[in-house]
Amino acid sequence: MTLSVIFFKGCYSFYNQKILSSKSQVIKSECRIIKHELGESCIPINPQRIIVTDQESLEILVALGLKPIAATTANRVGNKAPILKGKINKIIDLGKESQPNLEKIVKLRPDLIVGYSLSYQNYQLFSQIAPTVSIEYKENGWKETLLQVGKLINKAQEAEKLLEKYHQRIETLRVAFRQKIKNKEISVMRFYTSIQFTQFLNELSFPVSILEEFKLSIPLAQRQISSNANVSYNNVSLERVNLLESDAMFIALDPGAEENFQKYQNSPLWQMLNVVKNNRVYTVDSGYWIFGNILSANAILDDLVKYLLEES
């Protein structure tokens, strides 16, 4: 944390002159005051040069019909290119979410910067470049976030229509799920690239909140462990893989996590799981299974239909 503060202070002093110069060249337009978790910002009525500091903000803006000029890439999970389907071509890469390229941001002269749960240091720094809004981040509150961003960029009706269409799809699928896989218990896991353990995701997570739309739940043993947790995951060592026993298992692999996953697959403890013996283990893309919004939610629905309805 100390190093991060030193880094941001250094960046602030180094770029301060460039930032002020850049801001003075930007044509001032009408703006409106937006309150957010870190304060108030006066943002343009129709921003044209938006920069986003995370993949989830990028997903929301693309879903609402906008194309930011630049975005960061995720620190660990896969990127969202597969679900954005060519809609982010020519968007400038600002580097990893944890360390965006500040010099690029200044040169791009954005008129709005948007990010999930920005740190106070980042918010202060970005606010010297352009009006900046920090979106409150809650994994299982993604619908509220979509509506919030819709209001922020004058796309409230579009956001409501996206949710309406999503709910219609849920209602259509709910009947099929109720008939075919009623009361099934589903494990949702994540394997990292460089961390030697795995995790199961609980009710506070993005994907499990989608499972609950169909009255599907994580296994009882997992619910009991996570009942007092204030995070969306629980770590699982190889010795505790019995916690993962379920009717079906979805495994989100981070880029390069195959070797770590292989260690579990080679274990006799893993091979003893009934869900493994019954070939009900499905690997999926962490780019949209771990964190996301409306486009990721629909991509997860596609996987649920494919593996739980069509293949079961």
Image (cartoon, rainbow, N blue to C red):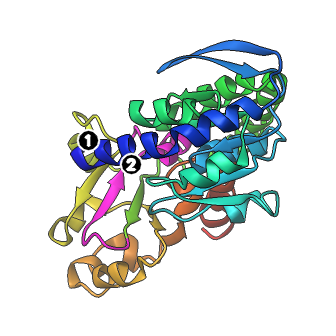
Please say if 212 is above or below 242: above
Q: What percent of the width, then of the height, locates residue 31?
A: 77, 16
Q: Residue at the location (25% across, 37% down)?
A: 229
- Residue interval drawn in magenta: 193-218
- How crowded pointer 1 is (Cα within 10 Å; few <14, some 14-19, many 20+) is rated as some
The answer for how far apart the CA atoms under marks 1 and 2 are is 10 Å
Whether 217 is among the magenta residues is yes
Contact flag, marks 1 and 2 (Cβ < 8 Å): yes
- How crowded pointer 2 is (Cα within 10 Å; few <14, some 14-19, many 20+) is rated as many
Residue in the foreground of this view, choosing between 109 and 298: 109
Q: Which mark's residue is nearer the viewer, 1 or 2?
A: 1
Horizontal side, residue 7 vs residue 308: left or right: left
Please say if 163 is above or below 211: above
Secondary structure, mark 2, is: loop
Residue on which the image places disc 1: 226
Q: Residue at the location (45% across, 37% down)?
A: 122
Q: Residue at the location (78% across, 40% down)?
A: 49
**Could one spot residue 117 in this view of the protein?**
no
Whether 208 is among the magenta residues is yes
Horizontal side, residue 173 vs residue 117: left or right: right
Q: Residue at the location (51% across, 48% down)?
A: 207
Q: What percent of the width, then of the height, locates residue 53?
A: 57, 46
- Determine which quarter of the picture holds residue 197: bottom left
Residue on which the image places disc 2: 218
**Could one spot residue 19 in this view of the protein?**
yes
Please say if 98 is above or below 90: above
Q: Specify the amino acid type for callout 1.
A: Ser
Horizontal side, residue 125 vs residue 261: left or right: right
Secondary structure, mark 1, is: helix
